[in-house]
Image (cartoon, grey):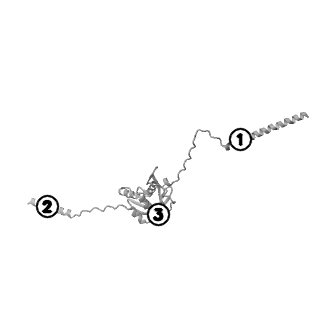
Amino acid sequence: MASSQALLFLSLTLSSLIATQSATPVAAPGPTPSPLNITGILDKGSQYKTLMRLLNETHIMDQIESQLKHSSDGLTLFAPTDNAFNNLKPGTLNGLTSQEQVALVLYHVLPKYYTPEIFETTSNPVRTQATGNNGAYTLNVTTTSSQVNVSTGVDETQVSNSIYAKFPLAVYSVDKVLRPYDLFGTKAPAAAPAAEDTGKVKAPDAKAVAPSKAADATASGADLGRRVGWMGVVVVVCLGSLL
């Protein structure tokens, strides 16, 4: 009798557990985060057409969006307005090689997600995505209580506003194109070519020789004058003795 009751109790317990598990809904997997659409972010601002064109022509748009999928540090993009590009000296962009255009665009990308608060504690110089023969191109960022300033050594501007700021991407509008010093800085004048040493004796400079000849002529004239003077004295003495 006791064993029958124990079996009945065990059976009821198992049935209850099975029913409870069946009634608990299985959580559905969350939606996969959609990739960031930088074109859409910039297009909302309606004043970044030139930057969008350069990002696409240099294929940096694809590079940035690919990095954002795998980056644990995020990225920051400084976005010059169309007016900023229009204020460049005519021919500035066309005067750059394809590689230099890539470097110019990548100079506006920082390999880290920065907020204004993070900028406040960031040490200068700040590394960008652009690189050259001397390594990574850098810029300086300074902050005040309500403003972020960016300096390249060629240009200095303020961050006018935040277009997008949600990890892993921050996009800030700037009123000037950030020109890296490595591309637009003052170039040292080229050294003058060394004079070729042929081993030949150079002819004396005519101007240098002329004064010497003049001096010799003067000396010769003075000597002749002295001789003529003595001859005159001798003639006078002789005539006096004859008389």
* Cα distance in 3D space between marks 2 and 1: 137 Å
Label placed on residue 11: 2
The residue closer to the viewer here, 208 or 76, is 208
Nearer the camera: disc 3 or disc 2: 3
Tell me how many marks there are: 3
Question: Dot 1 surroundings within 10 Å: few (below 14), some, or many (20 or more)?
Answer: few
Relative vertical location of residue 73 with respect to residue 218 in this rendering, above or below? below
Q: Position of residue 169 (x, y in %)?
A: 39, 60
Q: Earlier in the sequence, mark 3 or mark 2?
A: 2
The answer to whether residue 126 shows anywhere in this view is no
Nearer the camera: disc 2 or disc 1: 1
Q: Amino acid at mark 3?
A: Asp
The answer to whether residue 3 shows anywhere in this view is yes
Q: Amino acid at mark 1?
A: Lys
Relative vertical location of residue 145 with respect to residue 243 in this rendering, above or below? below
Q: Which residue is disc 3 drawn over?
A: 82
Q: Amino acid at mark 2?
A: Ser
* 184 lies left or right of 243: left
Q: Position of residue 81 (x, y in %)?
A: 46, 63
Question: Dot 2 surroundings within 10 Å: few (below 14), some, or many (20 or more)?
Answer: few
Q: Position of residue 180 (x, y in %)?
A: 48, 55
Q: Residue at x 88, y 35 (%)?
A: 239
- Residues at marks 3 and 1 touching, judged by CB atoms closer than 8 Å: no
- Residues at marks 3 and 2 touching, judged by CB atoms closer than 8 Å: no
Q: Earlier in the sequence, mark 3 or mark 1?
A: 3
Question: Dot 3 surroundings within 10 Å: few (below 14), some, or many (20 or more)?
Answer: some
Q: Which residue is disc 1 drawn over?
A: 213
Relative vertical location of residue 20 with respect to residue 224 in this rendering, above or below? below
* Cα distance in 3D space between marks 3 and 1: 72 Å
Label placed on residue 151: none
